[in-house]
Image (cartoon, rainbow, N blue to C red):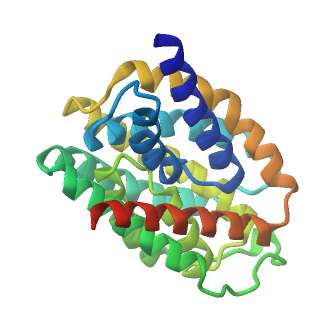
Amino acid sequence: MVLTFIIVIFAIGFIGSFLSGMLGVGGSIIKYPMLLYIPPLFGIVAFTAHEVSGISAIQVLFASIAGVWAYRKGGYLNKQLIIYMGGAILIGSLIGSYGSSLLSEQVVNVVYGILALVAAVMMFIPKKLVDDMPLNEVTFNKPLAAILALVVGIVSGIVGAAGGFLLVPIMLTVLHIPTRMTIATSLAITFISSIGSSIGKLITGQVDYLPAIIMIIASFIAAPLGTKVGKKMNTKILQFILAIMIASTAIKLWIDIL
């Protein structure tokens, strides 16, 4: 039973972190429903929504470090975006994750469902072709970036996500950042956000340590592998994979909620 537990949790962490590194998201969009639905299928454990959000928060912290490290060369990390959006999302995620302990299981799941739905719709909105733009010429609306990051931080902090799955469509569709810069930079912002989420979840006792540690180990192996694959893939394929994944997750969760 213990071995099954370790294998299942490790597999969830590995798959989520591989996709995290490849697509520039923290991986919570994938890991949240996997942790909620897969362990009970094997009869090993049924995590509550609060436990899932706590495990996700800690794991995303380490998955995003591994992803950023893999992207550190090549000029894909936009420092101004990281400063403006990172600072705002850190404040938001601290507020959201601390406040989440006051919410019911159902509310946490509904918040996640709304986030997934918004992200899915945004991923299918046609984007301006900015992928050919030189990386040193990329500009963006700084106040708008900070406000959006603050909002993303609050709502994603509630579900233990770092908001990467919302940051990616926002950076692509609203701020018009090139795809590869979006993927690399969102991982760095996700890392900053997950610091706030993790602190809030730890303070309010929402973290189950054993599965969190298993998933951290998986993320250190899988996230850099995903990043290598992501660097070589066509950007349109990357966007399509992320859009389909987010949409299917949103549909599954809303069927359960309703």
Instruction: Please name whichever residue, 163 or 71, is drawn nearer the observer in this view of the structure.
Output: 163
The quarter of the picture where the C terminus appears is bottom left
Q: At which x and y percent is residue 252? A: 44, 62
Figure quadrant of residue 7: top right
Asked if residue 234 is positioned above or below residue 43 in the image, the reply reads below
Q: Residue furthest left?
A: 102
Identified at 36% across, 56% down, the residue is 156
Asked if residue 168 is positioned above or below residue 90 in the image, the reply reads below
Q: At which x and y percent is residue 142? A: 49, 74
Asked if residue 129 is positioned above or below residue 93 in the image, the reply reads below
Can the viewer see residue 120 in this picture?
yes
Looking at the rendered structure, the number of numbered marks drawn on it comes to: 0
Instruction: Please name whichever residue, 137 or 1, is drawn nearer the observer in this view of the structure.
Output: 1
Can the viewer see residue 141 in this picture?
no
Identified at 78% across, 72% down, the residue is 236
Identified at 43% across, 74% down, the residue is 118
Identified at 45% across, 36% down, the residue is 41
Figure quadrant of residue 125: bottom right
Instruction: Please name whichever residue, 170 or 249, is drawn nearer the observer in this view of the structure.
Output: 249
Asked if residue 199 is positioned above or below residue 152 in the image, the reply reads above
Q: Left or right of 89: which side holds 80?
A: right
Q: Left or right of 248: which side holds 52?
A: left
Q: At which x and y percent is residue 11? A: 60, 31
Q: Residue furthest top?
A: 2
